[in-house]
Image (cartoon, grey):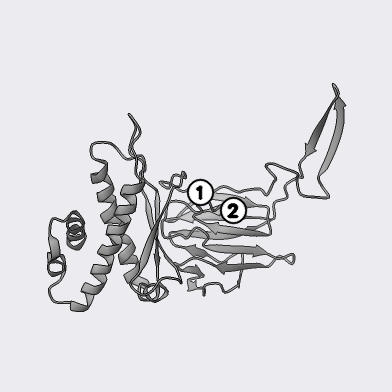
Amino acid sequence: MGLIESIRKWIDGESGEGLLEAADEHARPRRIWEEFLVKIAREVEAVMQREMFTPPGGPTYIPREYIVYLSADDDRNWQGDKRRGLEQGLFHVLSERARELSGQTPLAAKSFAVELRVDGTLSKGEFRVQAVWDETESGHTMVTSRVNSSQSGTPAFNPDLTIRETMETGENEQTIVRPRVIELYSMEVWRDGVRESVVPISKPEITIGRGSRSITVDLPLKGDPEVSRVHAVLTRENDGRYWLTPKGRNPTLVGGRELPREDRTEVRPDDKIAICNFVLRIQPR
């Protein structure tokens, strides 16, 4: 925690240019990455300060998520342990800064996430930070199935959907009979060796991930910031075969083997699908 504390002090202006010397006097190449980390931390803090607000008598609100866009070159450099170190360092430093900036007022957000992404328009060494306001609590995992139904407007045509018009008191009323949901299979959701839920699936193709306020997924995996908003897509063919396509930055493993990103791979019901801290298993009908 010495480096993280030094970064926090540098952000505060307490230790000036002495951070890098205090961080590591012997590993000159590492200082480039440490300085880059501090620049990002400063920018995320600036975004946090611009966005935070405290209503009268209420807690202080800050965005729950911060997306740091890197250049393609920097993204290639920040992979593996270095990437995890950068994300964890930013998370710990900025968690402390959020509490300090709110002063005596408690924070409404119990936790927040920092995610790295790529912006192909940026040059090496450049980055930008985007705050994301998300009302979804991330303190625990909530897994729910979402049935594809129309919430407003004219429902899409479905041979099993019938609309009956009746005349009552001179007004037209529509009685909508919704189609019966057919369960195709179920998904077991495990975390830390404990089965949290069994989710019925009624769609031939589902999205799996953390989701966000603007991105809805069919199988949400909440509580782990390493899970991408859309981490994978699972497809069931008419012949009963299943295909998994990884989408996330962090690994997706099947049977202990990491799948290439964007590579459509067949999976079987007995296979264990590992996504960060979660393990999924298909249960056919």
User: Can you say which quadrant of the picture contains the C terminus?
Assistant: bottom right
- Name the residue nearer the viewer: 41 or 219: 41
- Badge 2 crowding class, 10 Å Cα cut-off, few under 14, some 14 to 19, many 20 or more, is many
Relative side of 168 to 54, left or right = right
Task: Measuring from the top left, give residue 66's x and y in whole percent.
Answer: 39, 55
Q: Callout 1, which amino acid?
A: Arg
Q: Are marks 2 and 1 in contact (CB under 8 Å)?
A: no
- Name the residue nearer the viewer: 72 or 27: 72
Distance in Å between CA atoms under marks 2 and 1:
13 Å
Q: Is residue 120 above or below residue 202?
A: below
Relative side of 67 to 267, left or right = left
- Name the residue nearer the viewer: 190 or 213: 213
- Name the residue nearer the viewer: 14 or 159: 14
Task: Measuring from the top left, give residue 102's x and y in whole percent.
Answer: 27, 41
Q: Is residue 155 above or below residue 267?
A: above
- Badge 1 crowding class, 10 Å Cα cut-off, few under 14, some 14 to 19, many 20 or more, is few
Q: Is residue 2 above or below residue 170?
A: below
Residue highlighted by disc 2: 218
**Secondary structure at numbered mark 1:** loop
Q: Nearer the viewer, mark 2 or mark 1?
A: 1
Relative side of 255 to 30, left or right = right
Q: Residue at x 58, y 58 (%)?
A: 207
**Secondary structure at numbered mark 2:** loop
Quadrant assignment, res 83: bottom left
Task: Measuring from the top left, give residue 75's x and y in whole percent.
Answer: 39, 72
Q: Callout 2, which amino acid?
A: Asp
User: Can you say which quadrant of the picture contains the N terminus?
Assistant: bottom left
Check the image and name the residue furthest to the top. Answer: 169
Q: Earlier in the sequence, mark 2 or mark 1?
A: 1
Q: Residue at x 33, y 37 (%)?
A: 54
Task: Measuring from the top left, give residue 280's x and y in whole percent.
Answer: 53, 59
Residue highlighted by disc 1: 213
